[in-house]
Amino acid sequence: MSGKTTRGGGLPLPVVLAGARGHGRWHLRNIRRLQDEGLVRLAGICEPDPLTPAELAEDFGSFGTFEESGESGESGESGASGDVAGRAPEQSADFGALLDSTGARIAVICTPIPTHTDLALVAADRGVHLLLEKPPAPSYDEFLRMADGVAAAGVACQIGFQSLGSHALPAIREMIASGVLGTVTGIGAAGAWARDEAYYRRAPWAGKRRLNGADVIDGALTNPLAHAVVTALALHGATRAEDVGTIETELLRANDIESDDTSCVRVTTPRGRVTVAVTLCAERPGEPYVLVHGSGGRITFWYKLDRVLVQRSGHGPEEIRFDRTDLLENLVAHLTDGVELLVAPESTGAFMRVVEAVRQAPDPVALPADAWETVPAENRRTVPGIDGLVAAAAETLALYSELGASWASPNEVSTG
């Protein structure tokens, strides 16, 4: 590490969370879990509006006293089970000042996508290590600015692709290397989810490609189902930017938004093809998965469940469930014991090439009115037949237009 990473102290490591609402609530609960294990301590929360005691208690636990002014209060006697003894986390809208006042060793950044790079560099400049939510940046240039700045500061940076902490990934790679599937012929991924109107109104940047002149690129491929893309690329052995050849995209939308909600991408590398098909307009939402095709079998990986199904010639199907290493826990182990980071910035370079291809592509095409339907009871839109098309794309490695979807636009091709 460089000379900047000099903040001392042993366990628990003080953590500041930037962005504690929305998905940040998951991080609050995870930090609480690791605090209970003695690994970290929630030292600060950065939000424009401080969390109320009730909000903090819902996902983290309560404190005896709690000052909303940004001052840490001494706790009183513990109340209900799950209360946390010690000082309440300091709160401030000034991220840099909060890092300074708390002596943070780690910053967890779960803020709007366009803010990721600047906040990461604020932390790096102070020698604070990072867990940076995905996608790490809205453009490849911003990604490089972040990655170069973090490297120059000598701090550790973990990118929050939780699926890459699954123990299934090295196991599948070992199966591939040992020839369990014969010759790998390609990798597909499918994600059929549903999002209602409120999802696209949850924040000013939601569903946007740009906001106030800044890139956002909050589309199905690059944010909610980004794990499908990065996991498929990882199993293909294409993690770095230089692993990517050509990228074909088909970006469409059924909802009244700027970004894509029904899309597919095909990445071609020297090793073969990876096709990812996704939608947020599923008729019957299901678990997303990655499908490894081989000449002698196939492996299906439901990455949110850490569940793997192996099917191969001459053998019965075998289902295996794996454990997962939490990425914040891995970052702590990296800082204290030198354990290798699971998702360093360079290992997301190929994913960021996909983000850049989506960014540079023409704006997503609006589906014709007869291609989507409204589900009034759920206040959302569906695309009839999309569930089958998503699955077929993962199965055949074809794009929507090649599968005969009348509404699919001609694909755009970019080179890595």
Image (cartoon, rainbow, N blue to C red):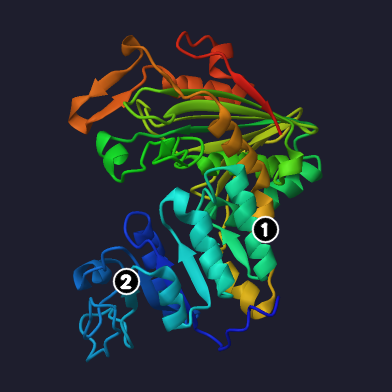
With respect to residue 64, does 162 lie above or below? above
Q: Which amino acid type is shown beneath numbered disc 1?
A: Asp
| Residue 125 circle label | none
Left or right: 292, with 57 as reference point? right
Give coordinates of residue 222: x percent, y percent: 51, 39
- For the point 34% across and 68% down, the residue is 93
Q: Residue 76 sits in which quadrant? A: bottom left
Left or right: 341, with 113 as reference point? right
Q: Which residue is mark 1?
A: 148
Q: Which amino acid type is shown beneath numbered disc 2?
A: Phe
- For the point 64% across and 61% down, the residue is 149
The front one of 200 and 112 is 112
**Dot 1: what SS?**
helix
**Dot 2: what SS?**
loop
Give coordinates of residue 312: x percent, y percent: 70, 33
Left or right: 265, with 314 as reference point? left
Q: Which residue is mark 2?
A: 60
- For the point 52% across and 42% down, the residue is 226
